[in-house]
């Protein structure tokens, strides 16, 4: 470390609450997905921002979305179930169209993974913010530390990436750390 470098703060979280929330998310996933226990899951988030210029004031609106992401290597399925911040409600499952996925990328600094769709598909791809949240998190689901789940998901993405390369799809550079 340099002379003026700051040591990063350790994330503060309640381990018991974290485990309880993981159990709730597993239950929600199993309610939304048939044979849900055959999937590995982790929590993900997404944000969207909308800027509007006004006559007097400009406004910037940020919306936070929370998901349970499930993936299965046996048939290379990836699904998403939207959940609320309090973990009381969930949507139906949305399965990613894996036949349209041509790229996989990961940005370690931001803890964002991407499944990129082919050109002309209509969407750029699916973004997964898979970082941890502590007890002082303001916008996300608090106390969801998932280092082990994230590593398993990144292993899955690396294998998917190599499959896509074998199919002739050029991939961006991959750095996990």
Image: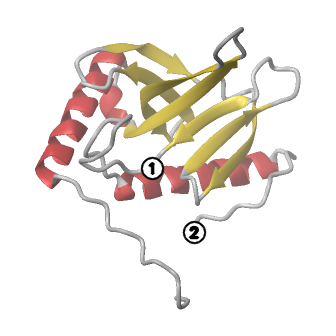
Q: Residues within 10 Å of mark 2 (few under 14, many from 20)?
A: few
Where does the image place residue 159, in percent across and percent down from the top left?
62, 53
Total labels drawn: 2
Q: Residues within 10 Å of mark 1 (few under 14, many from 20)?
A: some
Query: Quarter holding the C terminus?
Result: bottom right
Where disc 1 sits, the SS reads loop
Q: Residue furthest top?
A: 55
Q: CA distance from mark 1 to mark 2?
A: 13 Å
For the point 54% across and 52% down, which residue is it? 111
Of the numbered discs in the image, which one, if any, rests on residue 29?
none
Q: Residue furthest left?
A: 16
Residue found 57% across the figure and 53% down from its top:
110
Image quadrant of residue 24?
Answer: top left
The single residue placed furthest to the front in the displayed view is 56
Which of the two residues, 6 or 167, is positioned nearer the viewer here?
6
Where residue 147 appears, as percent x and y from the top left, is 37, 58
At x 80%, y 54%, the residue is 172
Q: Are marks 1 and 2 in contact (CB under 8 Å)?
A: no
* Secondary structure category for the residue under label 2: loop
In the image, which disc is placed on residue 177? 2
- Of the numbered discs 1 and 2, the one sitting upstream in the chain is 1
Q: Which residue is mark 1?
A: 131
**Residue name at image x 72 percent, y 16 percent:** 53
């Amino acid at each position: 470390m340099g002379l003026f470098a700051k040591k990063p703060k350790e994330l503060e979280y309640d381990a018991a609450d974290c485990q309880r929330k993981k159990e709730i998310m597993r239950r929600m996933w199993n309610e939304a997905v048939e044979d849900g226990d055959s999937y590995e899951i982790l929590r993900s988030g997404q944000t969207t921002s909308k800027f509007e210029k006004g006559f007097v004031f400009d406004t910037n609106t940020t919306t936070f979305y929370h998901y349970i992401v499930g993936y299965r290597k046996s048939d290379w399925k990836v699904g998403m179930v939207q959940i609320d911040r309090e973990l009381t409600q969930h949507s139906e499952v949305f399965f990613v169209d894996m036949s349209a996925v041509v790229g996989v990328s990961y940005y370690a600094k931001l803890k964002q993974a991407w499944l990129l769709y082919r050109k002309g598909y209509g969407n750029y791809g699916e973004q997964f913010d898979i970082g941890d949240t502590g007890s002082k998190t303001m916008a996300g689901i608090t106390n969801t530390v998932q280092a082990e789940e994230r590593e398993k998901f990144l292993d899955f993405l690396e294998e998917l990436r190599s499959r896509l390369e074998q199919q002739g799809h050029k991939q961006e550079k991959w750095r996990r750390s």
